[in-house]
Amino acid sequence: PRRADAVLVAHHDLFRSLLSRIAAMHRDDPERRDLMRVLAQELDMHEQIEDHLFYPAVSAVSPDVPVAHSEHRQLTDLL
């Protein structure tokens, strides 16, 4: 089994890839809208994993958890 942090890092790589593809597309490209939906779904899933599994596990040793949570919430709200 893969470690949870490795899964989250791989997910960040997916986000970078999706964002690069989206940025390279014309605003009117229908595929761009589809990729934005995929990105939003992946972000929602990612946020659920972090909120319910990762953040509780690291909150005792990291003061940055509230900041990270806030940043993810802002990005989700923007999408």
Image: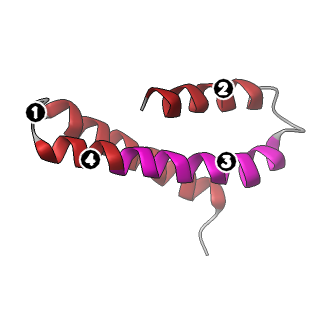
Task: Give amino acid for label 2.
Answer: Ser
Crowd band around label 1 with a 10 angstrom C-alpha radius: few (<14), some (14–19), many (20+): few
Which region is colored magenta? 38-58
> Is mark 2 in CB contact (under 8 Å) with mark 3?
no
Marked residue nearer the N-terminal end (2 or 3): 3
Marked residue nearer the N-terminal end (4 or 2): 4
Q: Secondary structure at mark 4?
A: helix
Task: Give amino acid for label 3.
Answer: Glu
Q: Residue at x 46, y 53 (%)?
A: 10
Marked residue nearer the N-terminal end (2 or 1): 1
Quadrant for the C terminus, please.
top left
Task: Give amino acid for label 1.
Answer: Asp
Marked residue nearer the N-terminal end (4 or 1): 1
* Cα gap from disc 4 to disc 2, whole angstroms: 24 Å
Depth order, front residue of 31/67: 31
Percent of width and height locating residue 78:
45, 26
Q: Secondary structure at mark 2?
A: helix
Residue wearing tag 1: 28
Depth order, front residue of 31/64: 31
Q: Nearer the viewer, mark 3 or mark 1?
A: 1
How does the figure colour the protein chain or chains? Answer: secondary structure
The answer to whether 55 appears left or right of 34 in the picture is right
Residue wearing tag 3: 50
